Amino acid sequence: MQLTATMVSVNIQTTISPYTQQPVCTRPLLSETELDTVINEAVKAQKSWRKVPLDERIAIAKKWLVCCLRNVNVR
């Protein structure tokens, strides 16, 4: 068996489906500064989200799930 070297970019991430072993999406990796910004925004969003009553969060999550299931076979 002959092995072939493949160039892999360290700036790109490809997500592979564990079910099909096929690429799902490819995206650029974030820089350290970009990642810090995203994390800080997520912390702010969580502080706001925790103030939303549980029943409202459940209703939002159910709407999101319906949307996801509707679009699951779009590709």
Image (cartoon, rainbow, N blue to C red):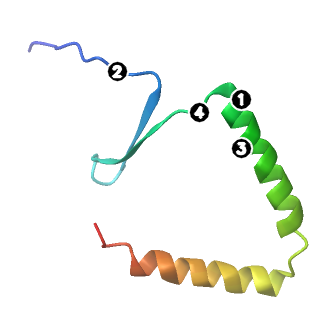
Left or right: 7 as drawn, with respect to 39: left
**Three-letter code, disc 2:** Val
Circle 4 Cα neighbour tier, 10 Å, few/some/many (<14 / 14–19 / ≥20): few
Residue appearing at x 47%, y 74% in the figure: 68
Q: On the image, numbered disc 4 is attached to which residue?
A: 30
* Residue for badge 2: 8
User: Mark 3 highlights which residue?
Assistant: 38
Q: Residue lying furthest left in this view?
A: 1
* Cα–Cα gap, marks 1 and 4: 8 Å
Q: Is residue 43 left or right of residue 28?
A: right
**x%, y% of residue 30?**
59, 33
Which residue is depicted at the point 89% across and 60% down? 47
SS for tag 4?
A: loop
Quadrant that contains the C terminus = bottom left
Q: Which residue is mark 1?
A: 33
Residue type pointed to by label 4: Leu
What residue is rendered at 62% in x and 28% in y?
Answer: 31
Which badge, 1 or 2, comes first in the chain's sequence? 2
* For residue 6, side relative to residue 72 (left or right): left
Q: Position of residue 34 (x, y in %)?
A: 67, 34
The answer to whether residue 50 is above or below residue 16 is below
Q: Amino acid at mark 3?
A: Val
Residue 56, horizontal then vertical, whole percent: 78, 85
Q: Are marks 1 and 2 in contact (CB under 8 Å)?
A: no
Locate the N terminus and report the quarter of the image it occupies.
Answer: top left
